Image: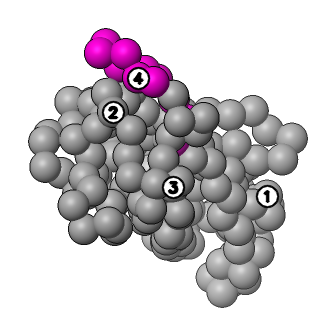
Amino acid sequence: MKKLILSAAFLPLLVFTSCDALKDKVAVKFDVPYSSEVAVKGLPGNPTIPSTGMKLTLFSTAEATKSDEYIKQNNTSSELLQEAKLSELKLEMKAPENQNFDLVDSIWVYLSATGMSEIKAAYKFDIPKNTKSIEMNLEDINVKDYFLKDSIFLRVEGHFYKSLDTNTIMNISGKLSAVANPIEN
């Protein structure tokens, strides 16, 4: 009899744990890669930069999210999407050959979308010398509502010590990891 009562007491815990395990097994997880080359014609306004440096927006760009396409490819729907988080973000100097990130010590990347406020998505401090490529530190934020819009706007800001070449080409690439779950919470 004690075993029966003990088993009945743990039954809700077993059911709850089993539901969580089932949710994890049926969750639809997919990655959305992005990559865009941006022509940067020097710093906006060609400012005289003081020796202490200056915080400026380097460039802004828009990227089509293609969320409908990715959601459909993964046999889910926007209503079932639980989260979308940046899982990678990289900035890379492509041209001219001698251009690197020596001109800046800190970089921030902000996201926005139509009707949504701008949020800080990534940053990098103490950028090493002679660096042509930067793996950004990511904020742990759910950008699902931004991903569901037609476009995401990226703004790259830095603390500059000198200007960059007017023929600079940068690549901004990243990956968004999304999770949809057909089982209600």
Span of residues in magenta: 48-58
Q: For the residue labelled by badge 1, is the local secondary structure a helix, a strand or a loop?
A: loop
Verify CB contact (< 8 Å) between mark 4 and mark 2. Answer: yes
In the image, 172: left or right of 181? left
Q: In this figure, which residue is indicated by the disc labeled 3? A: 40
Can residue 29 be spotted in the picture?
no
Q: Is residue 125 above or below residue 165?
A: above
Neighbours of disc 2 within 10 Å: few (<14), some (14-19), many (20+): some
Residue at coordinates 46% horizontally, 54% vertically from top-left? 166
Verify whether residue 55 appears in magenta: yes
148 and 170: which is toward the camera? 170
- Residue 16 in the magenta stretch? The answer is no
Q: Is residue 169 left or right of residue 152?
A: left
What mark, if any, has residue 149 been given in the picture? 1
Q: Residue at x 27, y 30 (%)?
A: 105
Name the residue that disc number 4 marks.
49
> Whole-Å distance between the Cαs marked 4 and 3?
17 Å
Way the structure is coloured? one colour
Residue for badge 2: 162
